[in-house]
Image: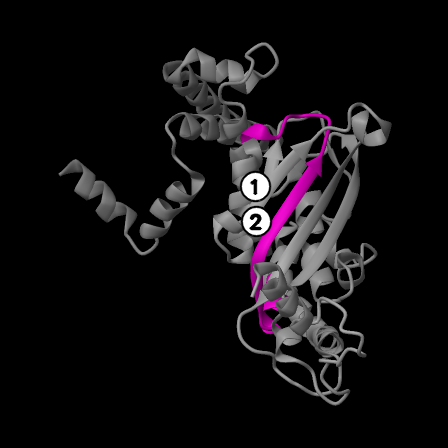
Amino acid sequence: MSMAFSCGSLLTRAGLRGTGKPPVSRRPHSGARSISSCLAPRIGHGFDLHRLEPDLPLILGGVTLPHDRGCAGHSDGDAVYHCVVDAILGAMSMPDIGQLFPDKDLKWKGAPSDVFMRAAREIMEENGYCIGNVDVTVILERPKLAPHKEQMRRNIADLLGTDLENINVKAKTHEKVDAVGENRAVSCHTVAILTRVSGPKSHSTESSTTKMTDSAITSLGQRISSVMGMVSDANTSLETDHILERLYQTVQSRRGGDPDTSWTSKLFSKGRAKIGQKTGEEALETVIAAIQGSRSECIKESADLLYHLMVLWADMDISPKEVWSELQSRENQSGLEEKRMRKE
């Protein structure tokens, strides 16, 4: 038997070549759903676009980028996180981020977008899915994203509870075309593939995506209340951690930058001794303002001191988390006892 005949027979048997007879349907009857369809990966696409406006932080993928303008939005305007959330929700045939977290709701005013990422992960895992992979394309004329893409990948992977290898971030310019190309906007596309962690929950005749959507919408209020309750209970802590982390990332992004365009880059270029000197000067000015009883000046000088401390930490590769951990380790420790130990 020739190879051609053998292959042809196989194609005919597989139903890929006509036999002159009506094909036999291999679909399950209307009262059943195939296991393969339940376990098939689901694909979602997300898109987001934000205007860029002066005097706003530019936050993309959880990274604060050095720029003279940032994303205008009801929350912190992180177009990358918003886009990823929409792709995940879309893969499960669910409402988009604007419906679940409407911009008319004051609860979300200025909210860090990692809240939305955590909610998307919770919905995804509740419905038996995990991340297969996520592919993000950011379209932005300035600044360059190459130095920041790895941190964006890490942030997304951490929030979605997946391996770094499952997350990809690409960056493109718009060749100076339209608002994006003129640096008046940033846009983002995301494709997400979700895979089943286990078998389907039900083989009933009702569509699983319909049941997932109904379930998600029914319990959405409870999840949002839970998230917002957590934010409310520790609102100051959450906002402070977010602001300080963004500040530290901004400082880190200026290392090795052009000293002629950034004061922080210039300070880095002068070396640790100069950084330490400036930090000491800011500490002294903070104390002087406090002694003089000027509350407003004390706040301003404290902000300057904190910024210069961040520069000093960055120069020594010390993260804010390490400092917070040291403070936490002293929580139940007597200050007097610590001083005695230091003298000994």
Q: Along the horizontal axis of the image, is 51 left or right of 341?
A: right
Tell me the kind of residue under disc 1. Answer: Met
Question: What residue is drawn where x is 83% and y is 56%?
Answer: 104
Q: Whole-Å distance between the Cαs marked 1 and 2?
A: 6 Å
Residue 159 position in % (x across, y down): 55, 54
Quadrant showing the C terminus: top left
**Looking at the image, which is closer to me, 292 or 301?**
301
Part of the protein shown in magenta: 121-147
Instruction: Report which residue position mark 2 lands on.
Output: 156
Q: Along the horizontal axis of the image, is 334 left or right of 65?
A: left
Q: Are marks 1 and 2 in contact (CB under 8 Å)?
A: yes
| SS assignment at label 1 | helix
Instruction: Report which residue position mark 1 lands on.
Output: 152
**Looking at the image, which is closer to me, 220 or 168?**
168
Residue 193 lies in quadrant = bottom right
Residue 143 position in % (x across, y down): 66, 26
Tell me the kind of residue under disc 2. Answer: Ile
Q: Looking at this view, name the residue that lies furthest to the left.
A: 344
Disc ID at residue 216: none
Q: How is the image coloured?
A: one colour
